[in-house]
Amino acid sequence: MIDWQTIETVLFDMDGTLLDLHYDNYFWMEHLPTFYAHHKGWTEAEAKHWLMEKIKQKYHSLDFYCIDYWEDQLDIDIITLKKEINHMIDFLPHAKNLLKQLTTLPVQTAIVTNAHRRTLAIKDDAIQITQYVDKDFCSHDFHLPKENPDSWPALADAYPFNPATTVLVDDNERVLASAATFGIRQLIMPLNPDSQRPAQTMQQPDNFIGLHCLSEILPNNQLSD
């Protein structure tokens, strides 16, 4: 699937790519609505509907991913709430193995996430994810979400890489399409970002490579983590 001898840079999304998206989905769709219902004196159904409508209005914007924004909008301490379930933070199958194997290759690796720095800190405290890559970047560093094509030149200025010899692994198809405009050729989409949900369907199967498990791109075909 990947000719690793031709690759110089590997860029990874975090949530739903290296880490199980179940933690984030559970937080926003279950844990937060339950808390907010008690906070506002609403039913859980009312709280979930209201929150989901607010969140939908911000899809694919930087605010959608911004903890500061949501704390201001909801007037609650989201970080403390997130930490209440940090035992759910975990790698997807073979993610650690892939990251470890890449350290044996002459490639540079980076996490490039839309997640807020404060969210990344929670994940890092729980499972030390940044120790497995050379660099880590958040979209807030560039004031643009990865869905915005202008984010990729900004990333390249901060972390020089050749798009022609770069692999991007990201479970967000809009992000992959955005990266394609910058010339990144190896675009891989994990189809099982949430271990507790069915596989997602690619809308552009001819443009990107769908991946059911990260074991499919292990350089050495070694499956043990």
Image: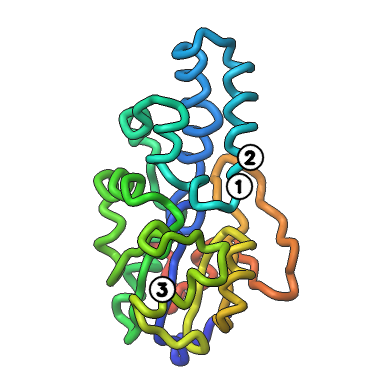
Find residue 56 and name its label. 2
Q: Position of residue 123 (x, y in %)?
A: 33, 47
Q: Residue at x 48, y 88 (%)?
A: 165
Find residue 155 and name its label. 3
Q: Residue at x 46, y 77 (%)?
A: 153
Residue 220 visible at all: no
User: Does residue 102 appear to the left or right of 73 in the view shown?
Assistant: left
Name the residue type under label 3.
Answer: Leu
User: Does residue 116 appear to the left or right of 187 in the view shown?
Assistant: left
Q: For the residue labelled by badge 3, is the local secondary structure a helix, a strand or a loop? A: helix
Q: Position of residue 48 (x, y in %)?
A: 60, 24
Name the residue type under label 1.
Answer: Tyr
View extreme (top): residue: 41
Residue 140 visible at all: yes
- The reply to whether discs 2 and 3 touch (Cβ–Cβ < 8 Å) is no
Query: Is 48 rendered above or below residue 214?
Result: above
Q: For the residue labelled by badge 2, is the local secondary structure a helix, a strand or a loop? A: helix
Query: Is 223 rendered above or below residue 158?
Result: above
Q: Residue at x 38, y 40 (%)?
A: 68
Quadrant where the image shows the C terminus: bottom left
Which residue is label 1 attached to? 59
The Cα atoms of the two marked residues, 2 and 3, are separated by 27 Å
